[in-house]
């Protein structure tokens, strides 16, 4: 049974279809990427999942039953892109206050906050005010207040914004740990390389509609172009014409080939082995999520950074 099941959600503003009949489900312990350009409907979708907005139609099932705000909000941690910390409030008392809103007692809150503060090297921050924090420090605090009550569903909207590489890795490791511990995570970002590294599944929305969803590797396989990279001890001399493949370009000591319909990688390897070429590597080139994103949203073909063929 999935933790979250979204069924035919719709939300309209006057004539704008912010979310237009979107459905998907998220299995427990999954890191799920929510992707889309600005104005695609991602924020509206997240606000309906968290009960901030009510859908015009459709259903949200949480933990096997229809979502109930009063009952289920305690099991959700939401870190919005627009941060929601009180600037004049001391960090420690603010974290305790937010934890109590999620159902923790004061003693439980203090214990868990101290554990997280120690993990993130924030022990000396307790009596500082939020307005005295840098953007990255504020980001760490926001993350802690989002997850410290151990919610079943964690929603992170651009969680790495403003973080240096060291703290980005720290947050990333904790995201993996939370998923391993059974938390389900929705990760919304514009950074496609982070999605490839972190997420198990993705959904791409554009203009309020779902464009695709599925596992990251499944999506990349769906949009592959039969391109392969063949590395050589020394690039073989041309000509390279053959019915089995077309030469797409070169890259360092590799040839990039596109295998034609009706042929297999074995035909390509056989061709170069017959030539006596010293093959050191052979691998398929899959499109990046960024390539797929641009292709589907902008309707443009995939772009490749290969050197032109000179032979």
Image (cartoon, rainbow, N blue to C red):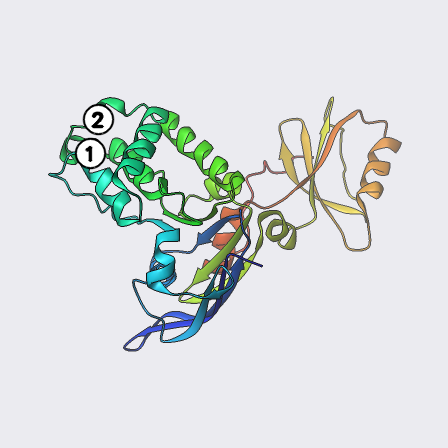
Which type of secondary structure does the marked residue at label 1 adopt? helix
Quarter holding the C terminus?
A: top right
Quarter holding the N terminus?
A: bottom right
Which type of secondary structure does the marked residue at label 2 adopt? helix
Q: Mark 2 or 1 closer to N-term? A: 1
Res. 39 in view: no
- Residue 151 position in % (x across, y down): 40, 47
The residue at which mark 1 appears reads as 91
- Residue 49 position in % (x across, y down): 39, 61
* Displayed quadrant of residue 241: top right
Nearer the observer, 260 or 24: 24
Image side of residue 82 versus residue 196, left or right: left
Considering every residue shown, the one lying at the far right of the view is 274
* Picture layout, residue 283 above or below residue 203: above
Res. 45 in view: yes
Nearer the observer, 57 or 270: 57
Image side of residue 119 versus residue 227, left or right: left
Residue found at x 41% / y 29% = 170
- Residue 238 position in % (x across, y down): 76, 34
* Picture layout, residue 181 above or below residue 234: below
Label 2 Cα crowd, 10 Å radius (few <14 / some 14-19 / many 20+): some
* Displayed quadrant of residue 121: top left
Please count the marks in the image. 2
Mark 2 to mark 1 CA distance (whole Å): 7 Å
The residue at which mark 2 appears reads as 125
Considering every residue shown, the one lying at the far left of the view is 88
- Residue 130 position in % (x across, y down): 17, 35
Where residue 149 is drawn, which disc sits there? none
* Displayed quadrant of residue 98: top left
Contact? badges 2 and 1 (CB < 8 Å): yes
Residue found at x 34% / y 27% = 120
Label 1 Cα crowd, 10 Å radius (few <14 / some 14-19 / many 20+): many
């Amino acid at each position: 049974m999935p933790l979250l099941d979204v069924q035919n959600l719709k939300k309209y503003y006057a004539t704008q279809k912010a979310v237009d009949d979107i459905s998907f489900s998220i299995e427990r312990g999954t890191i799920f990427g929510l992707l889309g350009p600005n104005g695609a409907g991602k924020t509206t979708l997240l606000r309906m999942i968290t009960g901030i907005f009510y859908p015009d139609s459709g259903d949200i099932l949480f933990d096997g039953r229809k979502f109930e705000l009063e009952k289920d909000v305690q099991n959700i941690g939401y870190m919005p892109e627009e941060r929601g910390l009180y600037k004049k409030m001391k960090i420690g008392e603010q974290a305790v206050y937010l934890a109590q809103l999620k159902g923790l007692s004061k003693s439980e809150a203090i214990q868990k906050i101290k554990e997280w503060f120690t993990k993130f090297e924030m022990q000396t921050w307790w009596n500082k005010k939020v307005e005295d924090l840098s953007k990255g420090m504020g980001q760490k605090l926001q993350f802690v207040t989002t997850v410290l009550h151990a919610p079943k569903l964690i929603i992170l909207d651009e969680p790495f914004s403003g973080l240096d590489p060291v703290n980005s890795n720290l947050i990333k490791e904790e995201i993996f740990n939370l998923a391993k511990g059974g938390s389900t995570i929705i990760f919304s970002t514009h950074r496609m390389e982070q999605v490839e590294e972190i997420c198990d599944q993705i959904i791409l929305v554009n203009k309020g509609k779902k464009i695709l969803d599925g596992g990251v590797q499944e999506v990349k396989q769906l949009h592959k172009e039969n391109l392969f990279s063949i590395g050589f001890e020394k690039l073989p001399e041309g000509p390279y014409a053959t019915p089995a493949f077309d030469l797409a370009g070169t890259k360092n000591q590799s040839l990039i080939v596109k295998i034609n319909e009706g042929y297999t990688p074995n035909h390509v390897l056989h061709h170069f082995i017959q030539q006596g070429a010293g093959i050191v590597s052979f691998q398929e080139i899959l499109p990046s999520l960024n390539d797929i994103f641009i292709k589907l949203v902008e309707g443009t073909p995939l772009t490749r950074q290969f050197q032109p063929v000179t032979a």
